[in-house]
Structure formats: structure tokens, C-alpha cells
Amino acid sequence: MTYNQPSQENVDKVTTYFVSRVKADGSRRFSEKLSIIAKSSDVALATAHRVIKLLESEKKITIIRQETRRIPTEYIYTGDIDGFLLEKDKDEQITYLQNLVRQLEQENINLRKQTKRTT
């Protein structure tokens, strides 16, 4: 079976969707179904899957797969967001960073709980 690389146009479409979600949510981490990503990016489902695998291999996103397929996959966009914090005023930057700290604290708590369950 041959692996076809997605076109740069399709990579740009999916990347644009990821950046728009990060800007809209104010967080680099979000949950989404692959079908929604494909539809919102205006690419085929298989193409979206290939682009996401490519972005993961390039370390532009981190994928957190859930134990059950009923829960959408979580993505952490680690790529560049041109001017994201620069275009906001100081209060918006502070709010964004405070939300990020809260998110990381909650993630830390969840990881500690998981660690306690496994030991």
C-alpha cells in the first residue's frame, strides 16, 4: 500500500482550521471529531487523516487519543500562531495566559489521579 502525501493546499486548509480553533477557544488544546475537522477544512475525511498524521510527524500537533471512540480526540496545536498574542491588548493577553495556567493545572491534577490509579 502506497502512502500518498497530502498536497500543500490541503495541509494549509487543515492547519488554518487548527489555528482558527486555537484563536477562537483561546487555548491550544481542544477536542474535535475527525469528520468535523475534514468538513470545516473542506477536505475529504481520508485527506484530513493524512494531514493530521503529517502534522503530528512534524511535531506541529500532539494527539491525545481517548480510551473510547465515543469521546472526540484531543489535539494540542504546538505550531506557530502568527501574532496571536501580539494582536490582543494587555488584558486579553493576561486572560489568555491565566486560562492556559488553569488548563495546565487541571491537566496536572488529572495526570496525578491517573498515576495514583495505576500504582
Image (tube, rainbow, N blue to C red):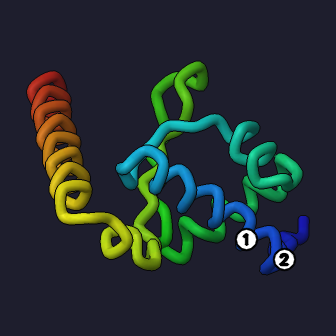
- In this rendering, the answer to whether 80 lies above or below 21 is below
The disc placed on residue 111 is: none
Q: Quadrant of the C terminus?
A: top left
Q: Nearer the viewer, residue 23 or 49?
A: 23
Q: Nearer the viewer, residue 34 or 22?
A: 22
- Dividing the picture into quarters, in which one does residue 3 lie? bottom right
- In this rendering, the answer to whether 86 lies above or below 42 is below
Label 1 secondary element:
helix
Residue 26 location, x and y as percent?
A: 37, 50
Counting every numbered tag in the picture gives 2
Q: Which residue is mark 2?
A: 7
- In this rendering, the answer to whether 2 lies above or below 48 is below
Check contact, mark 2 vs mark 1: CB within 8 A: yes
Q: Which residue is mark 1?
A: 11
Q: Nearer the viewer, residue 71 or 13?
A: 13
Q: Which amino acid does the dot numbered 2 rest on?
A: Ser
